[in-house]
Structure formats: structure tokens, C-alpha cells
Image (spheres, coloured by chain):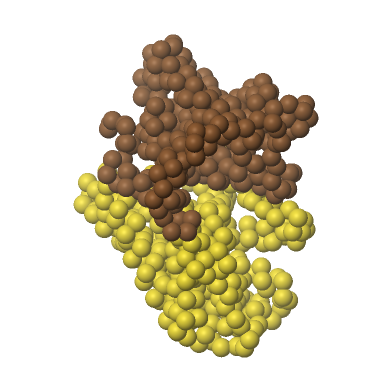
Chain colours: A brown, B yellow
Amino acid sequence: MNLDLVLQAIVTGVLLGGVYCLICVGLTLTFGVMKIINFAHGEFLMIAMYGAYFFAQYFHTEAYASVVLVLPGLFLLGVAVFQFLVRPVLAAKPLNQMLLLVGVSLVLQNGALALFSADTRSVQSAIAYAKIEFGEVIIGIPRLIAFAVSVIITLALYWLLRSTELGRRIRAAASDRETAALMGINVNRINLLAFGIGVGCLGIAGPVMMPVFYTVPNIGSFFILIAFVVVVLGGIGNFIGAMIASFVVAIAESVGALFMPGSTAPVLPFLLFILVLLFKPEGLFGTRSG
Amino acid sequence: MTRYRNWGWAIAALAALAALPALLGGHPMHVLIQVLLFGYLTYCWNILGGFAGQLSFGHALFMAVGAYTSTLLLLNAGVSPWIGMLAGATISAALGLFIGYLSFRYGITGTYFALVTLAFGEIARIVALNTPAIGGALGLYIPIQYNDFWQLKFVNKSQYYYVALGFLVLVLAVTAWLERSVFGHRLVAIRENEAAAQALGINLLRYKLLATALSAFLTALGGTLYAHYVTFIDPHTLLNMNMALEITIYSIVGGIGTLWGPLLGSIFLVPASELIRAALGHSYAGVHLVVYGAVLIGVILFAPDGLMGLVHSIGERRRESKTPTVSAHAKEQSP
């Protein structure tokens, strides 16, 4: 086995991990605070990517610039979906909460299919093909940017949750809804903000991913299962855990591709997921609670 | 008295259903077969998801095991699909026991069980795509040139209709039995409150496993029937998450865990999707899923017990208006 190949696979894995992490931090936030799995998370990503695409086409800019519009847009979309759809079922059975968001996902994904057709769309830009070469190992600049942004967002969210008043309230609402309410915390508002921020993170992910990936109406389904895997592996609501899990999963996938027959390497994250759920259900880095 | 009257209704309904093929043409017949087939699969899902309350997003996997096993046995060894479907169902039940044992043994339920089933479905999809021996990404064709009941091959759609009807009656009988039997009541007890069920001495693991195995077994039978009806199977359509979701949606919309809910759900939604497809054509593939999604959201927000829940509340209102004095009296009496 060529050492350069392995090295390249690890680098590719780390960079892909950055992309996974971008998608997962928001998901782990809503999962952690409301104990709801946002099945429509992938479709919100799809909307963010289309937003970035149309912005870049219309204003003839790099997709990154679209963050000024896509980020607030996604935040508001998250707030609206929470207010009108999720809030009424917060007290319902987990099954119904999950299926409600499955419904949202079906409407958004197939609505986009009707509106935009199944054509793949990608932005053409100077930066899309820029790369750095270290000997045989190649690093694409857009992936490097995605990686850097994902680390920054993760640390920012970690800081928000650990060191700010809002974060303290979010953590209180997450650990015990009723007691937090008794302590004068407006749990409803906290949930609304958490959902808005969780979806809003995709408002950064979409523009950052657009130079690397093309978008299609079902782009969300390519990432959502991996996102669930990462969130559970990282320990629900744990940002740093999600970041590390993103890298573990992505490196397993890219290095596994060197050793596994055909294109079967994508099964590795799911095998890992099943093993972890069986033997350490609180996640790789979580502590058992309750 | 009422009991005999119900049987009378059931026989009349069956007779009407048996006469339908004589009245309907090709396309309506196709829609009807889809209703029966997906109605059947919805009932199978409902045993685990509705009665035992364990939400599975991975039933496409059990369906695929049935479809692939019987098809491979037929194509490679000429084994009759009737025997092939039993083989597939047995493998499927074993797989169900494996997944169920892994999950329930460690107390994985609810949301996490749903994710585990999703993960198994995804692994199966990737493996199937990469295994040329079972057709890989190209899939498998079942050639049909002549009628042969033993080979489950029919040139005429109406024969598939009768076979699907037979399957539906079978699963309806199983569901009716679940509604009355101790076994079914124990599953419902587990769904409603695991801790209480355990305190009553119900072996949670055993009953959840039995429900999973039964559900997986019957689902695989439906998979074989599906394969022989559409005569083509591949991982993209069969191991697609939407396939598993549609079955779940029919059950929720009709009324989860009820005797008639799954049938109601498929009677309303399957023809709806066919109508939309027929009206909008191929350019808008998947638009029926927008409608499914919207109906699902509407049902969960406004009628969480599904269509059967609506039927019951209308029935109760009627009964109350028929005997207003008694119910009013009873309400006054209760403290």
C-alpha cells in the first residue's frame, strides 16, 4: 500500500469531516435541547444550498457572499417551522414529533423537485478548483475553507453554550424543562431560539459547501443519515463530540475506501453507529445521564 | 345478533371485492392491486409499529429480503416463488430477530430503534448495490410469458388481484387476532407503558422480539408478491427510504394500531398518488410525496389518531345524540 495514498485518504477524510461537522452542529443542538430528531435537517441544508446557488448566479459573486442573505433566511425559516409546526407537538409522543418532521422533509424535498427539477446545479468560480499541493498530497482550497469554518462554528457554539447567559438558559431548558420554567426561564422562547440557531447553522453550511458540492433536491438525503450517525456518536447535544465524531466517521469512510471492495466503504459509519449504540449508547464521548 | 350481522357484512364485502375485476379495466385494476399490496404491507408494519409501538424505518429491508430470496431461488434454481417466499420470510424473521435482539437487549427503543433500523436499511442498500451476484445496481428481471399459478406468474392483472386480496385477508385475520388475543394485549401494554408492563410480569424482550419476527416474516411475503407483480427489483426502488416511509404514512394516516386504519390509509393515499402521477405526468415524479408529507403533517397536528380516530369520534357523537338523557345523567352523577 502506497503511503501517499493513505496520507491523501486521511487528509480527504479530515476535510470531509469538516463538511459533516458543519451540517451536524445545528442538528445536535436541536436534538440536545428538545430531544427531537430533526428529520428535515437535510432539506434545510438543501434550501441553503439552493439559496447560495441562486445568490451567486444572480449577483455574479462567490457563493460565500450569499451568507449575508442565506444565514438570516435559514434562521427565520427555522423559527417559523418551530413556531407553527414543532411547538404544537412538543408534548406529543416522540413518534409523532419525528413523523411531523418527516412530513416537512417530504414536502420540502419533493416540492424542490417540482420547482427546480432533478438537474444538478453547481457554481463556477475561480476558487472552486484552487488547491495546495504537498508532494503527492492535494488539498482543495474550498474544502479547507469548509474545514476552517466548521471548526470556528463548533467552537463558537461551544462558547455560546458554556459561557453566555443564553447558553446557560439553553442548557437549563435542555436538562430539565419544567424546573427551568419554574426558575423563570421562558422555555418556549429558548426552544424557539435553539431551533432557529440549529437551522441557522445551515445558513453558513450551505454557502460554504456550494463551491465543493453540486446541489439537487435530494442532496439532504445524502447527508442526513451520516448526520444522525455523527450526532449519536458524538453524544447528543455535545458540539465537541460531534466535531470529533465527524472526523472519525469521515476518515473511516475515506481510508476504508482504500481497503474495502467496490464502493462498500460507506457502510463503515453505519456499522460503527450500530456498534456504538449497542455498547455505549450515550455516544463515544458522552457521559451516561438519567 | 350483531356478531352475525358483522359476519354478513364481511361476506357481502368480500363478494363485492371478488366481483370487482369483472367490472374494472386495466389501470383502475393496477391501482386496486397497489392498494391491496401496500395495504397488506402497512398491516405488517403495524404489528410492530402500531401494536408493539416500536417505530421501524427499515421495513423496506424485510420486503427486499423476501423479494430477493424468492427471485434468486426462482432464477437460479427454478424454485417456485410460493416456496421461495417462505424461505425469504424465514430469513427475514431471523434478520428481524437479530436486529431486534441487538436493539431491545440493550434497551434501545423509540427514536433510537428507528435510527438503528434506518442504519441497517442503509447498510443493506450499499451492500446490495455492490453485489453483482444479486444483480447489483442493475437489478433483477422476472420474465413472464405465460400464466402459471405455481410460478406466481400471471399475464392478466386480475389474478394478481385475487392473490393480493388473499394476502390482505390473511393479515387482516392476524390483526383481528392481535386485537383479541393475550399476545396482542401484551404488545399494547408494552407500547403504552413499558415499566408498567414489566411490573405486570410481561417479558419485554420476548414480546418485542416476537412482534418483530412476525412483522418481518409477513412483510417478506409481501416483498415476494411485490417482486412478481412489478417483475423487476433493484436496490434503488426497493431499499429506498421512501418505500419504508410510505408504509409508515399509510398506517399513521389511517390510524396506527387499529384493525381498519392501515386499509383506510392505503385506500385514501395510494389512489391519490396514482391520480397525481396520472395528472402531472413523469416530469413531476415525486410530487405525490408532497401531498403525502402535507397529509402526514395535517394528521399529526389535527388528528393524531388518524382517520380511524375521526371515525370513532363521529360514532361517539352519534351515540351521545341518540341517548342524550342517559349520558347527561351519567355526567351529572359522576363527581
Q: Quadrant of the C terminus of chain B?
A: top left
Q: Residue at x 47, y 71 (%)?
A: B133
**Picture coordinates of residue B45, whole percent (x, y):** 46, 59
Judge whether B154 appears above or below A119 on screen: below
Using the image as rendered, state which of residue B6 and residue A236 is in the foreground: A236
Using the image as rendered, state which of residue B135 and residue A263 is in the foreground: A263
Q: Residue at x 41, y 72 (%)?
A: B88
Q: Residue at x 66, y 47 (%)?
A: A110
Left or right: A58, with B61 as reference point? right
Residue B225 visible to the viewer: yes
The answer to which image quadrant residue B294 occupies is: top right
Judge whether A183 appears above or below A109 on screen: above
Judge whether A175 appears above or below B63 on screen: above
How many marks the image carries: the answer is 0
Left or right: A203, with B82 as reference point? right
The answer to which image quadrant residue A51 occupies is: top right
Residue B297 visible to the viewer: no
Q: Residue at x 63, y 60 (%)?
A: B270
**Picture coordinates of residue B56, whole percent (x, y):** 43, 53
**Picture coordinates of residue B90, whole percent (x, y):** 36, 71
Pick out the residue farthest to the front.
A135
Left or right: B96, with A188 as reference point? left
**Picture coordinates of residue A90, whole percent (x, y):** 48, 32
